[in-house]
Image (cartoon, helix red, strand yellow):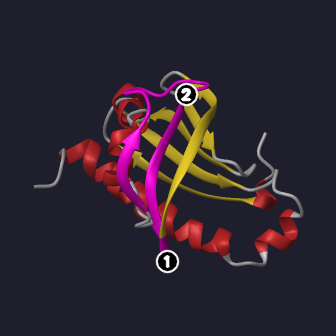
Amino acid sequence: MVDTSYAVSGSVVVQASPADVFAVLTDPRLHPVIDGSGTVRGQIVGPERLQRGSRFGMRMKMGVGYRISNSVVEYEQDRLIAWKHFAPHRWRYELVERDGGTEVTETFDYSRFPLPGVFARTGIPEGNRRSIDATLRRLKSYVENGPAD
């Protein structure tokens, strides 16, 4: 269960099946395409399809360039996937079938972070909320319309 006082989320309805949306989320090579933060830069390493316990890495840039390694820590086929890196916070996607489409909720969960109230005052969670909204727009567009030309 997520402590919502230490998490930020956004949702969107995608006109596609949960399986189609999940296929995009579990393909780490598509993460730079759907990333709304502008930090995921590519050079993805890891399996073609993520599942619980999968490890994958990528090149990132937030001011300076770096590489990050992630582990999938929550997984339910076509319903839920979450990963984390060396820190305890998680990026989670939950899918629920709705009216012929799929409601996708992305959450940045920092409830496991030491002193989450202090972390909240850094402004990072609010920046992540904006990135979540952009990511969900990009995910919706990619799934409904295919790759941009």
Q: Looking at the magenta stretch, what is its main secondary structure?
A: strand
Q: Mark 2: which amino acid?
A: Ser
Does residue 80 sit above or below 66 in this rendering?
above
Q: CA distance from mark 2 to mark 1?
A: 28 Å
Q: Taking 87 as reference, is 19 left or right?
A: left
Q: Position of residue 27 (x, y in %)?
A: 38, 34
Quarter-wise, where is residue 117 in the image?
A: bottom right
Does residue 6 sit above or below 120 in this rendering?
above
Q: Position of residue 133 (x, y in %)?
A: 47, 63
Q: Taking 109 as reference, is 103 left or right?
A: left
Judging depth in this view, the residue of 97 and 44 nearest the camera is 44
Judging depth in this view, the residue of 90 and 76 nearest the camera is 90
Quadrant housing the C terminus: bottom left
Q: Taking 55 as reference, is 33 left or right?
A: left
Circle nearer the N terminus (2, 1): 2
Where is mark 2, residue-wise? Answer: 54
Quarter-wise, where is residue 99 in the image?
A: top left
Q: Residue furthest left?
A: 149
Residue at 48% x, 25% y: name it: 78
Q: Mark 1: which amino acid?
A: Gly
Where is mark 1, residue-wise? Answer: 63
Judging depth in this view, the residue of 94 and 82 nearest the camera is 82
Q: Which region of the structure is painted magenta?
A: 40-64
